[in-house]
Image: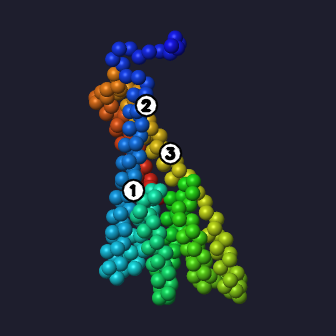
Amino acid sequence: MNEGAAEPRRGERPAWWRATIAAIFAATVVAAVTARVVVGGEAEIAASTAALRAGDPHEATVRARRAAQWYAPGAPHVRVAYERLMALGKEAERRHQRDVALLAYEGVHEAALSTRWLITPHAADVAEADKAIARLRSRDPRPPAAAVDPDAKIERELLAILAERPGPSRAMSAGLGAAFAAILGGLGWVLARAVDATGRLVAGRARIGFAIAGVGLAAWVIVLVVA
């Protein structure tokens, strides 16, 4: 037996018990955030579908773009949103509805940029959408200095600009960082101040911690919505 190892007092929960409580709290927060994202995304997909049935491709495109911005890795509504935006763009282009086509393709581009993290979501769709944007924008009216440039040259220049994909804005990164810190800080308060020696949660002490974590969770959702 290791004499240096401290043994828990009678009735006291071991260290692994506190670690389990922390894991449960963390999983609850992640599940709550994911559920909010999925609910928001599915609602936008439903609104997009309703707009399609009503014969309003513009509104259907706007709603699909919002659904794509309710991003969670692997969420079904995200895949549906990107597929719908690409389909709407191609169909509008086929019908020579340039404004709707650009709205759809640019929705793919901007939704991916606003939810980019370690990866760019649906990078293949973004690459295809960028080519379509450059192709359509190359036919826009030009300043006199570029009036005689061939469409192919303008298209290449536009594609190069679109390919320069910056990461999330500093404001968004700071907001998400502060929200995440509040969530962790609130849970840390609960573990440090509201769990007694036997591993029981003291509700009166936990209120402050849960309030801080709740504010952080709300801020996280708000940043994702307005990004």
Q: Which mark is residue 37?
A: 1
Q: Which mark is residue 177?
A: 3
**Residue 86 placement (x, y as % from top left):** 49, 75
Observer-side mark, 2 or 1, equals 2
Of the numbered discs 3 and 1, the one sitting upstream in the chain is 1
* CA distance separating discs 2 and 3: 23 Å
Residues at discs 2 and 1 in contact (Cβ within 8 Å)? no
CA neighbours of label 1 inside 10 A, class few (<14), some (14 to 19), many (20+): many
- Name the residue beneath numbered marker 2: 19
Q: As shown in the figure, which amino acid type bears the numbered disc 2?
A: Ala
Q: As shown in the figure, which amino acid type bears the numbered disc 1?
A: Val
Whether residue 141 is visible, yes or no, is no
Q: Residue 71, relative to residue 208: is it above or below?
A: below
Observer-side mark, 2 or 3, equals 2
Q: Residue furthest front?
A: 1
Relative side of 104 to 218, left or right: right
**Residue 201 placement (x, y as % from top left):** 31, 28
Relative side of 135 to 114, left or right: right
CA neighbours of label 3 inside 10 A, class few (<14), some (14 to 19), many (20+): some
Helix, strand or loop under label 1:
helix
Relative side of 18 to 155, left or right: left
